[in-house]
Amino acid sequence: MKFEPQMESFRAGDGLTLRYVVDDYTDPWRPPQTLFLLHAAMGSSRRLYRWVPILARHFRVVRPDMRGHGRSDVPGEGQLSFGRLVRDVVELADHLGCRQFHIAGSSAGAIISMQVALDHPQRVKTLAGFASPPGLKRTMIDPGKWISAIKQKGLRAFLEETIDERFPPGTDPDFVRWFVDEASRTNEEFLCRFVPVMREVDQTARLHEIECPMLAVVPDRDPHITLAQYEVIREHAPRCEFIVYHGFQHNITDVVPERCAGELKRFLLDHCG
């Protein structure tokens, strides 16, 4: 029986119950700095479990299940917007008594992380994004095609048919099965609302406003996002360290989690002061 950390919960400003995990193995005589880790779409805090041993010795790691994901409640009418997803993070930080924090995200979680840094610069000490452009509006992602496939075939079948877009040949098949099982738990009706919300985001014009140190780690074989679309971050964010993982598709945070977490740890320790 594997150890599962106990999830905690808080009530967001609009009344929705959201859940999260705190991993903290820092020295008890030192006040820890807090790091928020935001998962990708169709993910949950569980998808980042391999990051915890690398990061939680140095930081109090907070892993939320974003609304509609994992064990957090599914938002109802009027409870899903990009701004609301951003406010969830800030409200959780307030709930934890955390005035300033580091934040990192994967894919959609990274887009939300960037917006937290843009809207609340006084709160964010460092920012890191993995496999994320500044919003999805300028990418080749076709939300209508995705939604149509999910409605017609179901989320599990959609994931199984597109698995080669996410993982390279030779990826551990047991992990792939676990990934599909986990992602398939996502409420399909919610996902069909979530994807268009994220598809409308374009942060390009505001990237120059990101004041904190930033790490951007991207793949160069993403089938829906070109390297040039990723490189917009390097071109406009003034304090950005930009790293390309060559030969990888979109899901770098799942395929090479220890490498990603090690990259983040090194970046954080360089800048946490």
Image (cartoon, helix red, strand yellow):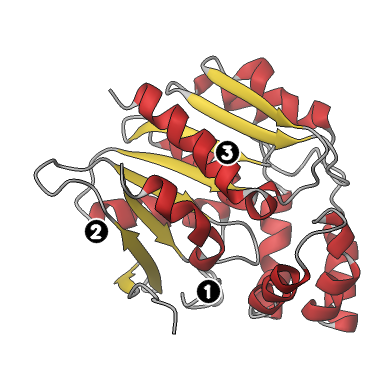
Q: Which mark is residue 70?
A: 1
Relative placement, left or right, of 28 versus 254 is left
Q: Amino acid at mark 1?
A: Gly
What is the distance, in whole Å, between disc 1 and disc 3 at their CAs? 21 Å
Q: Amino acid at mark 2?
A: His
Q: Answer yes or no: do the residues labelled 1 and 2 have beta carbons within 8 Å?
A: no
Name the residue located 31 percent from the left edge and 47 percent from the top edge.
57
Pick the quarter of the image with the N terminus: bottom left
What is the distance, in whole Å, between disc 1 and disc 2 at their CAs? 20 Å
What is the distance, in whole Å, between disc 2 and disc 3 at their CAs? 24 Å
Return the x and y of residue 198 as percentages of the image width and height. Answer: 67, 53
Disc 2 marks which residue?
Answer: 95
Return the x and y of residue 80 as percentages of the image width and height. Answer: 56, 65
Earlier sequence position, callout 1 versus callout 3: 1
Q: Amino acid at mark 3?
A: Gly
Disc 3 marks which residue?
Answer: 129
Report the front residue among 169 and 249: 169
